Amino acid sequence: MLLFTLLMVYIPVFLIGLALPLFSKKTLFFGVNIPEEKSNLSSLKLLRNKYFINYCLSFAIASALIAYGFSRTGNEGLLISLSFIFVILLSANYYYIHRKVKRLKQQEGWIIDKKQVVIVDTQKRSKDMAISYWWFLLPVAILAFGVLFSMIQYPYLPDKIPGHFNAAGEATRYDNKSLLSVFSIPLVQLGMTALMLGLFRVLRVARITINPSKPKTSLLQGKLANRRWGIFTVLMAILINLQLLYTQLMVLQLVDSSRSMLVTMLFTGGIIALVIITGFMTGQGGSRIKVKDEELENQNPSLICRDDDRYWKLGMIYYNPDDPTLWVEKRFGIGWTINHGHPIGKILTVIIIVLLGASLILPMIK
Amino acid sequence: MLLQIEFESETPIYMQIKNQIIRGIATGELKLGEELPSVRQLASDIGINFHTVNKVYTQLKQEGWVVVHRKSGVIINPELKVDSNQEYMKALGESLDIITAEAFLRGVTKEEFMMIIDAHYASYLKEGK
């Protein structure tokens, strides 16, 4: 069972890490701001291949060491530590190539004769193609459905209700019947829906980085990408709510739990598939979306994005106190990250460091 | 309309935004009554301080290019009525003074200079008032 979970989680994670360079924009090579025409250089292709090789090798070695350690000691903590090691390996491999690209850019003076500009659109963002908030009625309806059933069923429930299930759908813990224990899953649903709604809100106004050498194409790609991620959050909210509704119906003993494992696998698989498909079809900032290239004739290769490499510490942590934006596009891979120089970003940074520190130190005290 | 901001330019950023908005009105890229992004949105899209954008909007408002509506925010003045008053003509003369002087010294003839001006005016009048 443990092995199964490991494969289910770690193989997709490994593959996503391997594919990360493919999600990036042509103007950002391993987090380094470059002119688009340089992205086809053979020296850069060599570096990318180097990343693939290093990444695979380091993962193979780390996995083998852990597997060996596990077979000797049987310590499950080792397997769980694998996720930490994955993150560290990924970052280290990325940073190694990032530095090489940066040096190459400097040595060959790629941006010396270029004009660095920031392009922004004056159209109000809310008017664009973002989808409506009303779509969130769907996950809310699922949530309401669960609440309604729980209310109807509440008087007929036994004094002890299942509080936790294992993967096979057998109850592993029973709780006393109370409003809190019966409605704990709807509460989680509420929290998850709110989280997705929050993400949706951020995405509606998220900054679109426009490539100055072909502004219209990249603006359209960015808008389409934000729209897709908006739809993605709605779909995620629906999937999560459905899965939790199923568990709630198990708690209420309205559905038989024999197919629980299949259902969980279907939903988990569905969520992972949704992430991967949306990522591959969209790419960072819509870089993988094909739009009609109307601008081919009037591209302006003398313009490049403002060189903001210096604000990206280690090529991955954005720290720019002069930028009032909290959410910015990630430098590598896909998604958004926070500006650690923003007041809220600073607070979040402290919280993250404290939590990380605590999770490392607390087990030692025990 | 797309604004193009150069961080390394000698022209201050607020000036670049202001100039481009006025130019956008002249060429018709910005329609009268069109909404502009909020101070927050524009500042965060460019990645600059709110005050800089605030300064732009305040100046544009004072000069009559935009109006601030309580509901729809900053919009291009739908009843745009900016005239060439004496004060403006004086400022225009002063800016042209240095521009023509340099053009003259660099050997740009009066005809060439007028042709450039013509081309600019042509692009404005197409959609203009």
Image (spheres, rainbow, N blue to C red):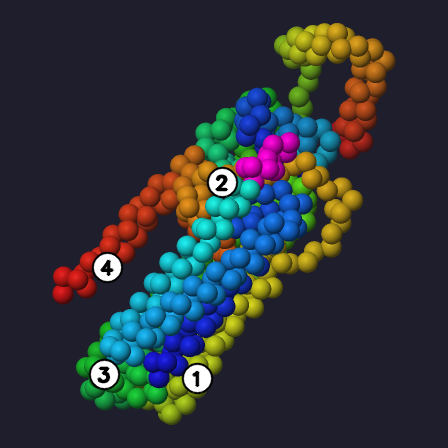
A296 in relation to A240, above or below: above
Mark 2 nearby-residue class (10 Å; few <14, some 14–19, many ≥20): some
| Viewer-nearest residue: A119 or B24 | A119
Residue A299 visible, this orientation:
yes
Which comes sooner in the sequence, label 3 or label 1?
3
Report the residue at 57% width, 21% height from top: B10
| Viewer-nearest residue: B123 or A29 | A29
The amino acid type, in three-letter code, at marker 4 is Leu
Q: Which residue is mark 2?
A: A309
Secondary structure at numbered mark 3: strand
Q: Which residue is mark 4?
A: A360
Report the residue at 61% width, 32% height from top: A112
Per the model, the C-alpha gap separating discs 2 and 3 is: 52 Å
The amino acid type, in three-letter code, at marker 1 is Val
> What are the residue bounds of the magenta stretch?
A105-117
B110 in relation to A20, above or below: above
Residue A306 visible, this orientation:
no
Q: Which residue is mark 1?
A: A263
Which comes sooner in the sequence, label 3 or label 4?
3
x, y (%) of residue A282? 59, 60
Q: Chain of mark 4?
A: A
Do the residues indicated by labels 2 and 3 lie within the same chain of the protein?
yes
The disc placed on residue A173 is: 3
Which comes sooner in the sequence, label 2 or label 1?
1
